[in-house]
Image: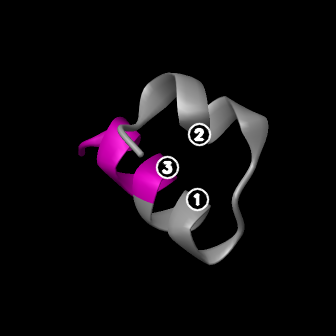
Amino acid sequence: LDVKKIICVACKIKPNPACKKICPK
């Protein structure tokens, strides 16, 4: 289970500040 990847995908749908720290732009 790749949590970071899941967060990144969710961020593409609904961006949030936490995503910028975890995922590349």
Using the image as rendered, state which of residue 1 and residue 5 is in the foreground. Answer: 5
Direction front: furthest residue: 25
Q: Which amino acid does label 3 sit on?
A: Ile
Residue receiving disc 2 = 19
Name the residue located 75 percent from the left edge and 48 percent from the top edge.
Answer: 16
Q: Residue 3 carries which label?
A: none
Looking at the rendered structure, the secondary structure element under dot 2 is: helix
Circles 3 and 2, Cβ within 8 Å, touching? The answer is yes
Q: How many other residues sit within 10 Å of disc 3, few (<14), some (14-19) or many (≥20)?
A: some
Q: Which amino acid does label 1 sit on?
A: Cys
Circles 1 and 2, Cβ within 8 Å, touching? The answer is yes
Residue receiving disc 1 = 11
Using the image as rendered, state which of residue 10 and residue 2 is in the foreground. Answer: 10
User: Where on the picture, by quarter, is residue 24?
Assistant: top left
Magenta region: 1-8
Q: Residue 7 carries which label?
A: 3
Name the residue located 53 percent from the left edge and 68 percent from the top edge.
Answer: 12
